[in-house]
Image (cartoon, grey):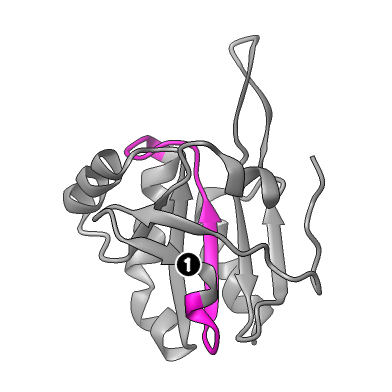
Amino acid sequence: MAHLNVGDKAPDFTLLDQNENSIALSGFRGKKVLIYFYPKADTPGCTQQSCSVRDTASQLTEKSIVALGISPDTPAKQKKFDAKFSLGFRLLCDTEHTVAESYGVWGEKSMYGKKYFGIIRSSFLIDESGTIIQTSYNVKPMDTIPNALNAIQ
């Protein structure tokens, strides 16, 4: 699994959001984009991470940052997650984990001694031209927003 670094061009993608709209990263040129990858909608850590993005929406808007959450969940699961927690931003569906692989966040994990493949919680801040300006692999749920904001202070 190759990691992306600050200064790399962010891999472009097009994914469905929770409303089944096609969303392309390239459609956000001219704005900063915070992309965060989470393992599964409506689980404790993923809920904490997504709610922290929701709760800092005004700070993100002030800094002209668009937030995009990405998980392997289907649009229906993402929509339910969005509605349950009034998240109010796009949740993208990487059901084939191709985008996760291109960002280096799909890898082997272990729980209770059982090994499996899944999303490694991570976040990326991308500048207006599509260049990565901050990476956080294995990020803690509550560190996603502070890491991104500190990168542009």
Query: Looking at the picture, how far across and down is residue 50, in whole percent?
Result: 39, 54
Query: Is 93 colored magenta in this rendering?
Result: no
Over which residues does the magenta segment extend? 27-44
Is residue 121 among what the camera can see? no
Q: Is residue 135 above or below residue 32?
A: above
Q: Is residue 6 above or below residue 40?
A: below
State the residue lying farthest toward the top: 113
Identify the residue at image location x=54%, y=89%: 30
Query: Looking at the picture, how far across and down is residue 124, in whole percent?
Result: 63, 64
Identify residue type, mark 1.
Answer: Ala
Is residue 14 among what the camera can see? yes
Secondary structure category for the residue under label 1: strand
Q: Is residue 105 left or right of residue 60?
A: right
Identify the residue at image location x=46%, y=44%: 71
Query: Looking at the picture, how far across and down is residue 48, in whole percent?
Result: 39, 49
Query: Looking at the picture, how far across and down is residue 41, in whole percent?
Result: 36, 40
Identify the residue at image location x=61%, y=64%: 12
Tell me if mark 1 has few (under 14), some (14-19) or many (20+) residues whose alpha carbon lies within 10 angstroms of its own. few
Query: Is 43 colored magenta in this rendering?
Result: yes
The quadrant of the picture occupied by the C terminus is bottom right
Q: Is residue 22 left or right of residue 145?
A: left
Can you identify the residue that label 1 sits on?
Answer: 24
